[in-house]
Image (tube, rainbow, N blue to C red):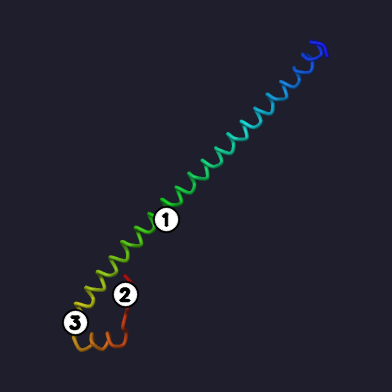
Amino acid sequence: MTLSEVLSISGPLAALAAAVVVVLASQKTSTARVWREEAEAQKQRADRLASDLTEIKNRLSRIESENRRLVQLLTSLDPTRLAAVQLAVNPTEDD
């Protein structure tokens, strides 16, 4: 092979190699973008769930406080009725 033949073959081969590198780089960039978008979506979902959990905890605290107040009122009105209610419904608490 002469030098001119080698150069005529190496030109298209170099262009092909450059095209492969560009395609692989763009695929890698696209993959990174997709993963970044997915991570952002998961973070937003986690933030929403954390907010919902905080709201549920606040509601539960408020309900427990209202229940304590209702028990106090019932006890002050009729302590024997409270004893009957506690015997009929024996709640268990999971901490």
Q: CA distance from mark 1 to mark 2?
A: 24 Å
Residue at 48% from the left image edge and 44% from the top image edge: 40
Amino acid under disc 2? Glu
Q: Is residue 60 left or right of residue 71?
A: right
**Residue 49 vertical position relative to residue 33 in the rendered view, above or below:** below
Residue 29, given in percent of the width and then of the height, sits at 58, 34
Q: Is residue 55 left or right of residue 72?
A: right
Residue at 32% from the left image edge and 78% from the top image edge: 92
**Residue 94 vertical position relative to residue 29 in the rendered view, above or below:** below
Residues at circles 3 and 2 in contact by the CB criterion of under 8 Å: no
Q: Secondary structure at mark 2?
A: loop
Q: CA distance from mark 3 to mark 2?
A: 21 Å
Q: CA distance from mark 3 to mark 1?
A: 38 Å
Residue with the most extreme left position: 76
- In the picture of the structure, the residue carrying the numbered disc 1 is 49
Front of the two marks 1 and 2: 2
Front of the two marks 3 and 2: 2
Amino acid under disc 1? Leu
Choose the circle earlier in sequence order: 1 or 2.
Answer: 1
Residue at 21% from the left image edge and 81% from the top image edge: 74
Residue 69, given in percent of the width and then of the height, sits at 21, 73
Q: Nearer the viewer, residue 44 or 2?
A: 2
Q: How many residues crowd around disc 1 within 10 Å: few (fewer than 14), some, or many (20 or more)?
A: few
Please tell me the numbered disc located at residue 75. 3
Q: How many residues crowd around disc 3 within 10 Å: few (fewer than 14), some, or many (20 or more)?
A: some
Q: Is residue 92 left or right of residue 23?
A: left
For the N terminus, which image quadrant?
top right
Residue 73, given in percent of the width and then of the height, sits at 19, 78
Amino acid under disc 3? Thr
- In the picture of the structure, the residue carrying the numbered disc 2 is 93
